[in-house]
Image (cartoon, coloured by chain):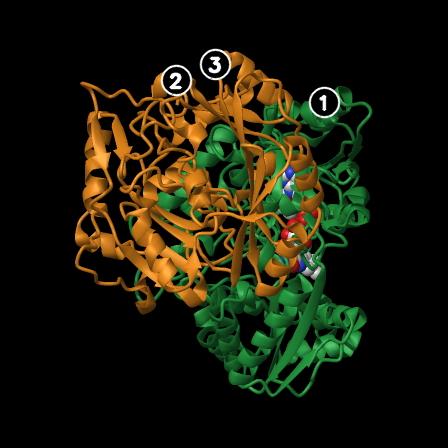
Chain colours: A green, B orange
Amino acid sequence: MNILYDERLDGALATPDKGSVLADLQQALPDMTLLHRAEDLRPFECDGLSVYRVLPMLVAMPHTLEQVEILMRRCHALGVPVVTRGAGTGLSGGALPLEKGVLLVMSRFARILDVDPQARTARVQPGVRNLAISEAAAPHGLYYAPDPSSQIACSIGGNVAENAGGVHCLKYGLTVHNVLRLDVITIEGERMTLGADAFDAPGFDLLALFNGSEGMLGVITEITVKLLPQPQCAKVLMASFDDVGKAGKAVGDIIAAGIVPGGLEMMDKLAIRAAEDFVRAGYPVGAEAILLCELDGVESDVDDDCQAVRRVLEAAGATAIDQARDDAERARFWAGRKAAFPAVGRMSPDYYCMDGTIPRRELPRVLKGIADLSEQYGLAVANVFHAGDGNMHPLILFDANQPGELELAETVGGRILELCVEAGGSITGEHGVGREKINQMCSQFRPDELSVFHAVKAAFDESRLLNPGKNVPTLARCAEFGAMHVHNGELPHPELPRF
Amino acid sequence: MSQDSHDANRHEQDRHPTHAEANRPADQDASEALAERVRRAHADRTPLRIVGGDTKAFYGRRVDISGVGETLSTSAHRGIVHYDPVELVVSVRAGTRLSTLEAALDAEGQRLACEPPHFGETATVGGMAAAGLSGPRRPWAGAVRDFVLGIRLIGHDGTQLRFGGEVMKNVAGYDLSRLMIGAQGCLGVLSEVSFKVLPKPAATRGLRLAMPLESALERLAEWGRKPWPISAASYHDGALHLRLEGGAGSVAQTAGQLGGDTLEADYWAALREQRLALFTDDDPRPLWRLSLPNNIPPLALDGDVLYDWAGAQRWLRSDAPAATIHAAAARAGGHASCFRGQHGAHPDEPFAPLSPVLAKYHQRLKQQLDPYGIFNPGRLYEAL
Ligand SMILES: Cc1cc2nc3c(=O)[nH]c(=O)nc-3n(C[C@H](O)[C@H](O)[C@H](O)COP(=O)(O)OP(=O)(O)OC[C@H]3O[C@@H](n4cnc5c(N)ncnc54)[C@H](O)[C@@H]3O)c2cc1C
């Protein structure tokens, strides 16, 4: 089933005349960069999920909020869809353009407006890179906690839109836990503020609703984030295992011992080898799995916790336990993990990164299921996880130049996500649904739940102009997907009309 | 919905055997009865006043349904559905007493880190989640909504819905779970909530440090930039009250550095449950809650103030006009709400007014999720 926007299933779009939309916008916004020639549009045809590409009708690159307002009003009036893009590192095709739409690029809003060390907050524009916030806060002994592996490149606006996570989210929370306030512009061109500089705001928690809303409800134009004091000390243990299941169980044992590590990550053999080849992190290439466990806080507590974790790992059957001797070694241990995706990318012409979550106890069972799928379909799968959170990133290796391999990789990916849902988990932990997992949403949610999502969307964007086709599938799409995908002999949505 | 079609519509997640229910005698799944009641209300367009233990009836606007509506009690729908300490997750039916949940967590050395207030023995988990009020640990640990992983909800037409789940991370679809926290039942009936729970810390210590208010606020701002194990900070009656929580080493070390007197162990519960002097009801003046950014100096408002959340939550006993209090809080970057009116009466309009744009989108959302205005009409704002 083709993943690209399909008006038959995803809803009809207005068919505007490119020339007249261009003329209209140029007249309304004479000072805004507006790209329209194919060669200028090309760099924007995909996000981090580069197997799917679509040339947008136009690319708008505003640099003032007034321009964003006017752009929204004009597009609303013309019935032209708007897809917002941050840095374009998203892995689910959330910023995949529409042929009949305007791509709104927020990268020129790249200023840090204010760092307030007394209030421990930073006020930033949406195009600011994630890492730049921590860099600006560092002189005050503060940092911004969520640290996606893409943090040198991804934008904070994109982080909010995806509710991005990172290796330290087990202890310090996801984006939603670290954002105090958002300024947004609606599709009708109105400005509003969600949340507050205080810890809460009156009315419904629209701040939480907008986190992870994938550019479907409004354009995020300013963000106030919480800053935390840098931990006094951080130590990292690396444990090797001769069996993936044992490593998976050790994760639960650490938590059960009452310890919440700053980070708890796991990599399997293929990922270990790839990372070691790429960055020489000092990983044990003979191991079936490694766990990286970071403990941070006040030194005496960290030392106690290191002892406790060491005991747990030994009892869980770790074959070796190494503690990083200094900050340089600690950075090296993490470098391997943070570079895991590109490292795997070097081993194979293409890879497809999944993002399912499961209850931790299901780790061994789901890993076994993934191994079986890998064997069955003949595609290698490397596993990298935010193990503490039960968030898995199976990386499916394939070659898009081989006819049929992309489809095969998609099939394996879809089956892995179904495994996650069956295990009580979710099809996406942090990368978002975007376009990529639009069909799997039909397995995760029932039609009446999808209808509630549509109702929420309608409250903010009745004419479905913001990022149409992403995040929540139409019921028509689910009916078609269900018809193609009869699961265990049951028809998932028998009540829906079928095409 | 018949039992069969209900089964066919079950979620994949629910089929898994480890999600089977605990069988306690007092526990029961009354969700279908609740849903049926909502379906009738939907058909008759009857407004419902949703209650759990009715301990927070004072909070928010009065839901006036006399003559036209009915009370919908969740209290028969109770029990811990699923608790797995290793997963740090617990799923609880809305009518379960908050104290029952806390006792179960305590037995495993865990807790709800947001330490929500009960305001009465009969407080339920559903009421706590709908009110969304958090205790003294909030600035350091997070609010109720920060610990919510998933919900089951009864929608306006009586359908039983599930959003989020029992996993730590889940960004599939919109975050309906967190949207419901603090919505005070205006968007649907919460029938079950899944929370992330946390282990209790190894050590805890309460300190009382006598000092003037200005020095206390100054120090709190400074300590806020240090990785100290502070988990609560209040100021009243000439003293700063601090709670330290963490490893034995860091707590002892910090306590040694700070000095001061040891605080009674039940102080934080008394603060949270509003049993301290400022809250007691013989004061006729309205009680206001001010929610402010960190590091705001004392506001020029008549009345008595108790500082919680290191100054970010202030309880004010004042006769000042509501408009004056709202304006002062807004100028400081926060907002005010009236917790108790004159002589403890129900305040007419407790919450800060929304901006026109925000009010419009609140109404649209209400219109979409509760088109006939069945759920707790007017509890938050007259138009919702
Ligand atoms: C190597 C690599 C590693 C990664 N590691 C992680 C990780 O550890 N954790 C993680 O969570 N993610 C990770 N990601 C995914 C990605 O970096 C995140 O999803 C990130 O939040 C996307 O930010 P962006 O600025 O690139 O957004 P984009 O890709 O440009 O957009 C993402 C979505 O946000 C919307 N959007 C963007 N800006 C705005 C705005 N201002 N207003 C409204 N909507 C907006 C878009 O419409 C789209 O739906 C990784 C990606 C790569 C390539």
Above/below status of A263 relative to B274: below
Q: Are marks 1 and 3 on the same chain?
A: no
Q: Secondary structure at mark 1?
A: helix
Q: Position of residue B217 (x, y in %)?
A: 66, 35
Mark 2 = which residue? B284
> What amino acid is labelled 3 in the image?
Asp
Q: Are marks 2 and 3 in contact (CB under 8 Å)?
A: no
A188 lies left or right of A231: left
B30 lies left or right of B312: left
Real-space Cα separation, disc 1 to disc 3, in angstroms: 56 Å
Q: Are marks 2 and 3 on the same chain?
A: yes
Above/below status of B292 relative to B162: above
Q: Chain of mark 1?
A: A
- State the residue in front, B90 or A3: B90
Residue at (33, 39) in percent of width and height: B127
Q: Residue A291 sits in which quadrant?
A: bottom right
Q: Residue B35 sits in which quadrant?
A: top left
Q: Chain of mark 3?
A: B
